Image: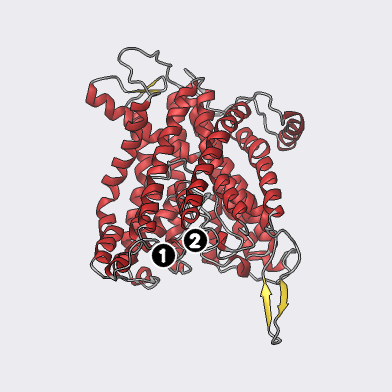
Amino acid sequence: MLTELAYVAFLMVAILSLAAPTGRYIARVFSGEETWLSPLIRPIELWLYRITGIDETKEMSWKTYSLSVVIINILGILALFLLQELQGFLPLNPQGLGAVPWDTALNTAISFATNTNWQSYSGEQTMSYLTQMLGLTVQNFLSAAVGLAAAMAVIRGFIRKDVNEIGNFWADLTRSILYLLLPLAILWALLFASQGVVQTLGPYVIAHGLEGTEQTIAVGPVASQEAIKFLGTNGGGFFNSNSAHPFENPTPITDFLQVLGMLLIPASLPFAFGSMIKNQRQGRAIFASMLLLYLMGLGAGLWAETAGSPFMENAGVSGGMNMEGKETRFGIVPSLVFAQSTTVTSCGGVDSMHDSLMPLSGLVLLFNMAIGEVIFGGVGVGLIGIFFYAIMTMFLAGLMVGRTPELFGKKLEPFEMIMAVVGLLAPSVALLTLAAIAISLPQGLSSLNNAGPHGLSEILYAFASACGNNGSAFAGLNAGTVFYNLTTALGMLVGRFSTILPALVLAGSLARKRIVPASSATLPTEGSLFVIMLAGTVIIVGALTFFPVFVLGPILEHLLMRSGMTF
């Protein structure tokens, strides 16, 4: 146990050591300053602008910026859908895989374009190498870059004054990929490959058993997809079992690098914000709020799993741990760290079976996704979400103490509050509505693996994952049906665009405002009081929104387990 707790400590040291310098680097990239990669990357960047006709100096209003976001997502969905339908006629398909069923193809196209990577199919049995690389991996880069670009636009809204422009989307998208995502992905892919993660374009391997039997062993270009899968908080696995597969996650080192990869950029963005706003204390305060919530959830999950099953206690066995569904190669603590990290970000990759967690651990994961995944969150969108909560925090605090609601030097008015509420609650409304439809129709109930409150948790998890653009699954629900393919696809679209588009509207509104100098009426946002208030607002809003349905799901299951019932 001490070794596993040392794993958590080492991860925290790594994040604390890397987040600040990475954040400062990100700030330099998007501020147009020279970086150590500029001599290599800048000529490529200028060449791309030249052949695409992009003027990087021409900035956009929030309307044009938003339109650009919508356009690239529509084009990405169409391209990926067609690629799946035509893969049987295209090269790099050594297994001769045919067209993907239309509903699965549509769900997958929307899933990867929205940074969700929800997978209702088995990758090694469904997607050709070309589809995996040209379709899924490319969208992993693009969807992460779109989120990062949107976050930069919102930051500019806070630091600019009396202007209508919030940046150039195409320049932000290009810089996200060239200066950040691609270099990190190359490094991570090399590290993965060095540890045994498969990377080949050869056909699947046929193994011959001692008794003359044959077994087909799936291989492919895995390491390259795994790298951006985590760094871009995407989560889509090459294989059906995701990071529980030994070809995706063969060693404790790759397991650690996968957790570090999914947390690195989201944890760095508060520091990037602090650098761009020229107030590092502000960035550290936002990071501290995220870290506090992360450790609270991790502590609750570890307590539930290491306490063991109530059935063992009822049988007179004490001190047991819940090893069901865990990655036995790594142990309970690394498995829980992975589960906590993948749901606080929008990654969705898994190395253990979330359906086998204790009910209260499952509650933690559900809560992480339902609140909008702002505890670090996805690349870019996590920072956007925490800005929404910060606006709500300062608005409520201003009402309670009679001070003018201000945030980062900008006066908050009803319009900003409306945009923040829309960004926070629209995915929640979609989640609860779609879940209610699923439990009311036979098409939704027929996919359940368990009855009772655990079955409700499976449905809630599916739509929390979709609407939160996470992509992980409890793995107890058969989501490969027309009903779930279409409803989760709708949830992904709502979750993505109801977060990014209000954020860009908010950025435009803030950029037109003047910067208000701090005064005695300004509530400080740099100290421990703000950290506690912000974390408390996240918890309270999440509890008020989801407490009733959580009571009927994981909380009721926990209570019934204490009395000897299971599902």
The amino acid beneath tag 2 is Ser
Most foreground residue, 360 or 36: 360
Query: Is 464 drawn above or below residue 10 in the view shown?
Result: below
Residue at (25, 56) in percent of width and height: 551
Numbered tag placed on residue 189 in the rendering: none
Q: In terms of depth relative to the viewer, which is nearer, 16 or 431?
A: 16
Where is residue 26 drawn, in percent x and y? 60, 31
Towards the viewer: 487 or 141: 141
Residue 297 rendering spot, x and y as whole percentages: 38, 47
Badge 1 amino acid = Ser
Dot 1, how many residues are within 10 Å of its Cα: few (below 14), some (14-19), or many (20+)? some
In terms of secondary structure, where does tag 1 sit? helix
Tell me the quarter of the image containing the C terminus: bottom left
Is residue 480 toward the left or the right of residue 219 in the image?
A: left
The residue singled out by tag 2 in the image is 352
State whether residue 363 is above or below residue 104. Answer: above
Q: What residue is shown at x 27% (from left), y 24% (from top)?
A: 398
For the question of whether residue 476 can be seen, the reply is yes
Whether pointer 2 and pointer 1 mark residues with C-beta atoms closer than 8 Å, the reply is: yes
> Which residue corresponds to mark 1?
356
Q: Residue furthest bottom?
A: 211
Residue drawn 28% across the image and 41% down it: 540
Q: Quadrant of residue 121?
A: bottom right
Real-space Cα separation, disc 2 to disc 1, in angstroms: 9 Å
**Neighbours of disc 2 within 10 Å: few (<14), some (14-19), many (20+):** many
> Does residue 78 appear left or right of residue 566 in this picture?
right
- x, y percentage for residue 80? 61, 56
List x then y, in percent, for residue 564.
Answer: 25, 70
Q: Is residue 30 above or below residue 309?
A: above
